Amino acid sequence: MRWFGKPGSRPDGGSARNYLSLRINLFFFGTFFIFCIIIIRLAGLQFVESPELTEVEASRETKDVPLAAIRGIIHAAGGEKLAYSTSIQSLYITLTKEYTAKAKNKDTGVYDFTAQAKARTKSLVARLTSVFNEYGDPSAKKLSQEDILALLDLDYKKSLGYVPRKIKTGLTVKEIAHFMENKESYPGVAVVEESVRHYDKDTVAVQTVGYMKLFRSTEDYNIYKNIRNAMKQTGADPGLTYREDEFVGIYGLEQQYQRELRGKNGYQTLSVNPQNMAEEVIASVPPVKGNDIWMTINKNVQMKTEQAIMDQIRWLHTNPVQGKYHPDALTGYAVAMEVDTGNVVAMASMPDYDTNVWNAEKLLPEVYDKIKDNYQNGTINENISGFSGNGLKSLIFLGSTIKPLSVLIGLNEGLFTTTDTYTDKGIAYFGKDDSSSVSNSSGHVLGPLDPAKAIQESSNAFMVDWVGNALYKKYQSEGIAVWDKYMKAFGLGVSTQSGLPGESAGVADYINTKQAGSVQAALVFASFGQKGKYTALQLAQYTATLANEGERIKPQLVSRITDAGGHTVKEFGREVLDKITFDPSYWKEIKQGMNTSVKVFDGFPYDFARKTGTSEMDAYGAVRDNGVFIAYAPREHPKLAVAVIIPEGGFGSNSAAPVARKIFEAYDSEYGLDGVPKKNLPPVEQKQESTVN
């Protein structure tokens, strides 16, 4: 019913103002009551539930655990797999709270695993042992309960708590089936796909390909120091995180292309409690397979090169050369490099070894003793040659192979011309009052020589009188710097830029004038190849530079990189590192001079430029002769440059040259020194083709 009364009055007789006051009081009382409840609740959160909430929040921290990718393949030029990975299945256990729960001992006050956790761990170890014995490979090493317990690392001495423990690798099909069918019975257990690295059993260019070791053993390698530092950066890509038990490249191309070959790890994101123990898997990202590397090395040419070196070493042990055996010739090094592309088609450091020995998690001492003198690449660094380090190294003097460059220097410096004639008397004198001298090999008197003939006849006297001594007279003490400039322009004394880890720049010991006796003496001995020690790869690059008339190109060991789908990611082509310009007549002169008589090349179907060398060095109390040989073929429009070094092998024409011929023949068969691969020709056509110069 509607009420029509006097304004300001209520039916019950109260005023409107009293009613409004009541409503305001009720509002403020309600607000005060709610505020008190909030204050009490906040106090409870702060002082009562705070520790529990803090632990809950901390338990939400996450960690990323890497899942290894399948490493890419290293192919030879023809596609043969020189290094490849195969999949294997491994058993990992993540130590969840079922196995790691701890409680405080009332008597000692020390936290220890609970009785339930101990029981679960004991049961797990027993069941795993039983499964491995029943379903595992009978020929594989048996894991005892003690072994498995140690691998669990319950005391976290080897790994943090959340890091999965690898228990067994190479699971059999039956073992895998058992664990997959009984997942619920094995909390924290996972079967993970991994890979194992294999190397061609033919041992093809093994020191160039390289090998692998565990990541935890790489603290001294700069590449892995950088990776470790990057892993510590905030926001680092989890896929680039390395596991300590992951195998990584340590030598050769395996190290040089580590990032490309490795691919990108996958990872699991785990929630972790305050004790750094895994709670659950939140997310999982699969790994990305590594890229494949395609080498320039031809497997057939490489294997024939390796065999040629070993055959020649055996021959030197059993056949006298100029009345002398060479039983101390134990090693040999050879490099074959295309003149037009820079592609290295063979790089042999012999003897070699089976790189698969590195696949074990630990290399046994007796195994290392067998390979310690051979596992490094003597074509690029100072490797042992001879008796257990007491003899020579793979860096040796170049001997007479330096003489084409000596003549070029003399011509370019105006010390003589292409038409000048030197009278060789078999000996040259230098020093104060001509108190020192250098003789030709066997004291041969060679008579009148122009510069080309001096190279061909290998006249030491010419080099001493008209290059070394003349350079000293022109520049005095600055002559060393002038000589050094030319050496480096031809790649002698600088890196070849191949990119191989550990490559030596050689030893420019002519700079040590005190050891030589004087600046003059240093220049004199350098002029005919008795100063300056270099690698076989440097010698091959130097030979290619001669063939390219002063254009020094980078040795290429990899032609391209492809992804898992076979698509080309990157290609490598001809790369010029340096260019030195000489008068065309100078190049013609040295090309004409590189015509030394080498009997082993009798019947060789191509005209080719070559130079033999014999360098003398001290080793275990005697002067040893090292065989050196360089050549490029054909002489006009050269295709291949070859360098061979046989330490303690005697004269280069007898020790190193036979290896070079077999390399040229192998290359001719595969590619053709004239552009026509002989292996593709019928036998009759091959014979006809071989008669064409």
Image (cartoon, helix red, strand yellow):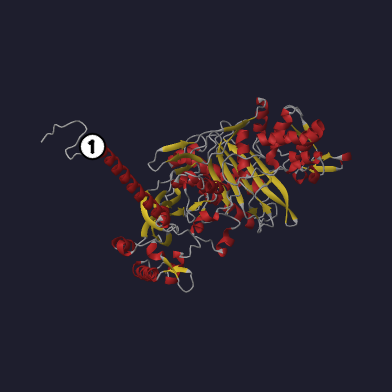
**Which is more toward the observer, 448 or 514?**
514
**Which residue is the site of mark 1?**
15
- Residue 379 placed where, x, y %? 60, 47
* Left or right side of 311 for 512: right
Q: Is residue 57 in view from this perspective?
A: yes
* Residue 17: quarter of image: top left
Displayed quadrant of residue 101: bottom left
Residue 292 image offset from top left, x and y in percent: 44, 44
- Residue 475 position in % (x across, y down): 80, 32
On the rendered image, what quadrant is the C terminus found in? top right
Amino acid type shown at disc 1:
Ser
Q: Which of 383 and 595 is in front in this view?
A: 383
Residue 597 is drawn in which quadrant?
top right
Q: Which residue is drawn at 66% across and 34% down?
A: 489
Answer above or below: position of 88 versus 30: below
Q: Is residue 414 above or below residue 458?
A: above
Q: Residue furthest bottom?
A: 107
Residue at 83% x, 39% y is 430
Residue depicted at x 87% and y 42%: 435
Q: What element carries label 1?
A: loop
